[in-house]
Image (cartoon, coloured by chain):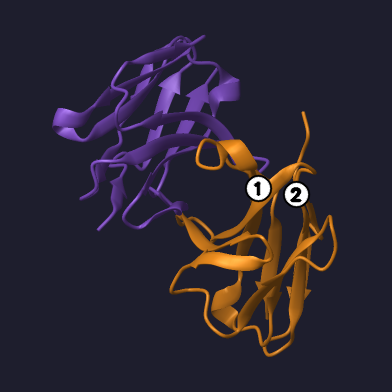
Chain colours: A orange, B purple
Amino acid sequence: EPEVTQTPSHQVTQMGQEVILRCVPISNHLYFYWYRQILGQKVEFLVSFYNNEISEKSEIFDDQFSVERPDGSNFTLKIRSTKLEDSAMYFCASSEADRRYEKLFFGSGTQLSVL
Amino acid sequence: AQKVTQAQTEISVVEKEDVTLDCVYETRDTTYYLFWYKQPPSGELVFLIRRNSFDEQNEISGRYSWNFQKSTSSFNFTITASQVVDSAVYFCALSDLKTSYDKVIFGPGTSLSVIP
């Protein structure tokens, strides 16, 4: 089955540094998402993206966060100046155009540790 | 406002026992979707099922079954004859039209341990 691929699997950074988390969604999918999961807590929606623009974002997704689809395959999440509380597992997801609300395909996540 | 409650934080069962994971949801919308996702120890999130609010038929898929009851706002998940490979965290989730179907709200999860 096609997969959503995320790199790196682990990222360690110093507080205040910029990080970019990368995702390659499934090739024929048109809707892209980022979710995060702080250790031991629930999975939280961050942002959804379609047609090269954000379609929905949560309160968590403030000015420190941005998303981009720089080419036809990658989907990135940038955190401009990381804070300790940004430490979490970040999941990328995608869904098919005609089955947008039916099923999210998640990647295996990037564990971000901010020191 | 949307909310998903999974009252059982952790459950342990012995292999081959049946287990039911509870999910109660809140939404003001009449049109919504309910989901179950599995997160095995390896960490990825695996889709199990989606139900829309107009379809109250229960569903069975192998050892898995789901009981959707709008009257009690519940969407419970039963694993029959549990196996060690079922050990995982299970998340119930909800999206509705008024908030946005794009924004799936996850419950806190139930950690299931199946003991051999």
Q: Quadrant of residue A15?
A: bottom right
Crowdedness near tag 2: few (<14), some (14–19) or many (≥20) residues, C-alpha within 10 Å: many
Q: Position of residue A87 (x, y in %)?
A: 61, 71
Q: Residue at x 69, y 65 (%)?
A: A52
Q: Residue at x 54, y 29 (%)?
A: B87
Question: In screen coordinates, is B80 left or right of A38?
Answer: left
Residue beneath disc 2 = A25
Q: Position of residue B62 (x, y in %)?
A: 52, 9
Q: Position of residue A8 (x, y in %)?
A: 81, 60
Q: Is residue B77 above or below residue A11?
A: above
Q: Is residue A7 above or below residue A100?
A: below
Q: What amino acid is at disc 2?
A: Pro
Q: Is residue B108 above or below residue A87?
A: above
Residue beneath disc 1 = A94
Query: Is residue A107 among the parts visible in the rendering?
Result: no
Residue that extends furthest to the left in the rendered view of this protein: B71
